[in-house]
Image (tube, grey):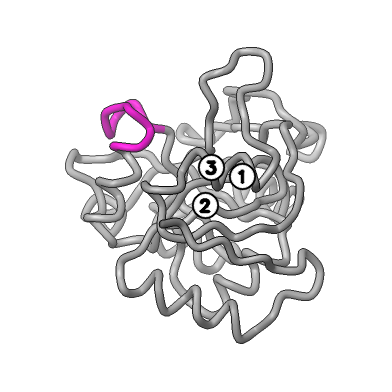
Amino acid sequence: MIDVIPIHSENPNKREISRIADRLRMGEIMIFPTDTVYALGCLAGNKKGLERIIKITGKKEKQTNLSLICKDLSMASQYTLPINGTTFKAMKRSLPGPFVFILRANKIVQKYFKGNKKEIGIRIPENTIIESLLDELDNPLISTSLNKEDLTQPYFIDPHDIARQYEHTVDILIDGGIGDFNESTVVSFVDGTYEVIREGIGDINLL
């Protein structure tokens, strides 16, 4: 049975955040708000949790758009190959914010996945709840967007709808209120220069 935990979007309850962090360390998976759509995730390194997430998406690991959610650039740099100056400046200008930066992954990231994953999406969302949780964890989350099988509205925005849909498959739902249905902007910096893979609400003029 999913445990719905309301968290204030601007002033998160530290005790609740600490309890959620403990449960993630124990291997549970959760649904949580970001600065764009709600997402599904677990603590990085939780292989069984990752397997559950992939099963829920109904896709294979390589087909699932998985990202690391980090609290800052310092944390992100621990999971990528060295970032050049152009990429660093673009990330510093635009993060935290609604962007996914696709970068070359290092060996730490490759241990998290079954295949030899050479690239990884990096997210640093501008969301107080997730910032507080990452401060408590001091480790990134592995996550993917929570998609609906509905082309007219492909994302869940109402936590009540999420709870009904994932009642028996997910451990925790952080209810941060009505979510957004706009996507993040996805940018590849794999080759040193940027390529916009998907234009979302992240302003590409910041790159």
Separation of residues labelled 3 and 1 (CA atoms): 15 Å
90 lies left or right of 58: right
User: Mark 2: which secondary structure?
Assistant: strand
Q: Which residues are magenta?
A: 55-64
Q: Earlier in the sequence, mark 1 or mark 2?
A: 2
Q: CA distance from mark 3 to mark 2?
A: 13 Å
Q: Nearer the viewer, mark 3 or mark 2?
A: 3
What residue would you read off at disc 3? 164
Q: Residue at x 61, y 23 (%)?
A: 154
Q: Is residue 46 above or below residue 113?
A: below
Q: As rendered, which of 202 and 168 lies closer to the eye?
A: 168
How many residues crowd around disc 2 within 10 Å: few (fewer than 14), some, or many (20 or more)? many
Q: Nearer the viewer, residue 37 or 117?
A: 37
Name the kind of residue labelled 3 in the image: Arg
> Magenta includes 89?
no
Name which quarter of the figure residue 182 lies in. top right
Q: Please identify the dominant SS of the magenta region.
A: helix
Q: Residue at x 71, y 58 (%)?
A: 176
> What amino acid does circle 1 point to?
Tyr
- Asked if residue 56 lies left or right of residue 32, the reply is left
Left or right relative to 206: residue 111? left
Q: Nearer the viewer, residue 92 or 21?
A: 21
Quadrant location, the C terminus: top right
Is 164 above or below relative to 18? above
What's the amino acid at mark 2? Answer: Ile
Disc 2: which residue: 31
Say whether residue 59 is magenta: yes
